[in-house]
Amino acid sequence: MTAMSAAAPEIATGRARFASTERSSLYPMIVGAFVGVLLISNVGATKLIAFGPIITDGGAFLFPLAYVIGDVLSEVYGLRAARRAIVLGFVMLVIAAVTFLLVQVSPPADGYENQAAFEAVLGFVPRIVLASIAGYLVGQLLNAYVLVRIKERTAEKALWLRLIGSTVVGEFADTLVFCTIAFYGVITGAEFVNYVIVGYVYKTLLEVVLLPVTYPVIGWIKRREPSYGAVGD
């Protein structure tokens, strides 16, 4: 066993190549962006939005980027590193939910007139966060797992297949679980089916649209990680 393989045992798995997170300056920044996008999206998701017959929520503007960043983590750093980021996101979501709950139930100061408004918006966050935690864990873990497993078969080829294939699986699980926990009962019947289908199709198509951006970003990060590809097939 070489010094490199001992220090970074996940650099190569079968034919797949990854970078070590040890002493990486980029990995913490990417994880920070991942968690930030997740938290902002969950607050935005408290509002349902209708564009004609199309029903979605405010999280649709930013949440798909969480999957793009998740793809970057899985593709460059591997399944174990992606799982660490996912767990950190889970912890921060729990902290956000508890914080909003404590703020909501704390007695308002004299003259404070926005308690009802606060409860109407952020009072709904605990349910959103519960839905997001469940959908996020299932979806992101499936997304990372599928991407890495495909990479073990394709090595550095067919990046588009890994990105789209993992998104198709991960986003479906995430969207179905999230929509059911967050909004079932608030919207039902055909509107609920519409909400699930539109959310899933939108998030999946957005990743396809963002491929011209995701490709060079992944390539840029790989070139700046000295440990990437240090171990051959």
Image (cartoon, helix red, strand yellow):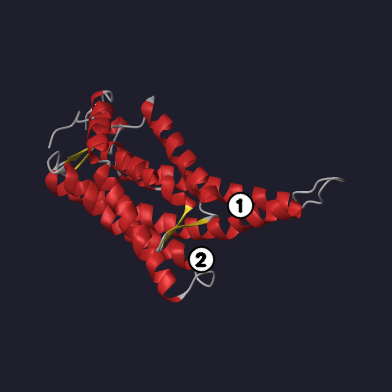
**Residue ranking furthest to the right:** 110
Tell me the residue at 79%/48% (across/down): 113
Question: Quarter of the image holding residue 22?
Answer: top left
Q: Nearer the viewer, mark 1 or mark 2?
A: 2
Residue 64 screen position, x and y as percent: 37, 47
Left or right for 75, reference 130: left
Q: Is residue 141 above or below residue 156?
A: below
Tell me the residue at 38%/31% (across/down): 27
Residue 14 screen position, x and y as percent: 16, 44
Closest to the observer, 69 or 18: 69
- Tag 1: residue type? Ala
Residue 179 screen position, x and y as percent: 45, 64
- Tag 2: residue type? Phe
Q: For mark 1, does the 10 Å Cα neighbourhood hold few (<14), some (14 to 19), or many (20 or more) residues?
A: many
**Residue ranking furthest to the front:** 52
Instruction: Determine if residue 18 is in view.
Output: no
Residue under label 1: 97
In space, the residues marked 1 and 2 are separated at their CA atoms by: 17 Å
Closest to the observer, 82 or 100: 100
Q: Is residue 68 above or below residue 50?
A: above
Tell me the residue at 25%/27% (across/down): 220
* Image marks 1 and 2: residues in contact by CB distance under 8 Å: no
In the rendered view of the protein, which quadrant contains the C terminus?
top left
Tell me the residue at 26%/52% (across/down): 166
Instruction: Determine if residue 15 is in view.
Output: yes
Disc 2 secondary structure class? helix
The disc placed on residue 183 is 2
